[in-house]
Image (cartoon, grey):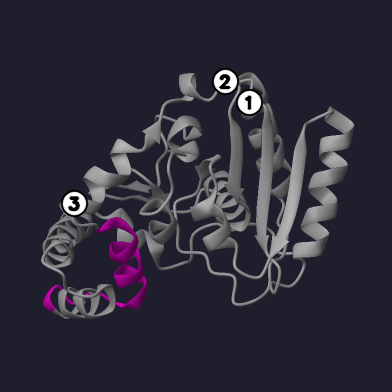
Amino acid sequence: MPKNRGKEGSDDKLFGQVFMQRKMKEAVADMSFLLERGYGEASSCELVGHRYKLNKRQQQAIKGMAAGRTAVANRKAKQLTKEKLKGKEIIIDGFNLIILLESMLSQAYLFEGKDGAFRDLSSLHGTYKSVNQTEEAIQMVGSFLTMQEVSKVIWVFDKPVSNSGRMKTKLLEFAAIHNYNWEVLLENNPDKLIANSTAVAITSDAWILDRVNTWFNFIAAVIPHDYKYLVTC
């Protein structure tokens, strides 16, 4: 089992230095302008990446942080505060949230986007493997949503991803122990299911955020105020 989802060896150099963060803020601003003007995400990121001489990992980061003004306004208008969660049904983009929490608990770099959502640089590549922080991440979700007195939690995972079935079993066993009203779904197209749901979504996926009725910024609610590895724009 992998130890954690902590930062890579070069990340302090790429993201930790003040001048690098300043350069990335400028890059995010430029890319956000292009997105607002209707340019495609991939072409905008490539253009801005070349302009600021960003490597692929840095380009991945600004891609997660950038968003046009219209998209930002739309997403923020649909965002609920934790006080509004009581009695609500919640639908969670499973791997998206779990991996973000694992990264945070592993002290990896996180990136706060123009829309306020947090993203990391982890990727599945068709396979999910639990890490040392997985259990703590699940406990964090359970404890927080219980405190908010939500009515039900629906976890949704990519069925084609290896070990999604194991995650389903782990979550249902955890829910049974703690008497949580949790349902776990394995779907071939989880993004579409979440986007079309009437439940409050928990995700940082931009495509989903543009389409949901309401969403909750879970990471913003639990990230420590003094988190050392946060890059903002």
At a point 19% along the width and 60% down the height, the residue shown is 28
Residue 204 at x, y percent in the picture = 44, 51
Query: Which residues are the magenta region?
Result: 51-66
Q: Is residue 177 left or right of residue 81?
A: right
Does the magenta-highlighted stretch encompass residue 170?
Answer: no
User: Which of the two residues, 203 or 48, is positioned nearer the viewer here?
Assistant: 203
Q: CA distance from mark 3 to mark 2?
A: 29 Å
Sequence-wise, the earlier of marks 3 and 2 is: 3
Residue 18 in view of the camera: no
At a point 81% along the width and 63% down the height, the residue shown is 165
Q: CA distance from mark 1 to mark 2?
A: 5 Å
The kind of residue on which mark 1 rests is: Val
Label 2, on which residue? 86
At a point 77% along the width and 33% down the height, the residue shown is 181
Label 3, on which residue? 70
Q: CA distance from mark 1 to mark 3?
A: 30 Å
The kind of residue on which mark 2 rests is: Lys
Residue 206 in view of the camera: yes
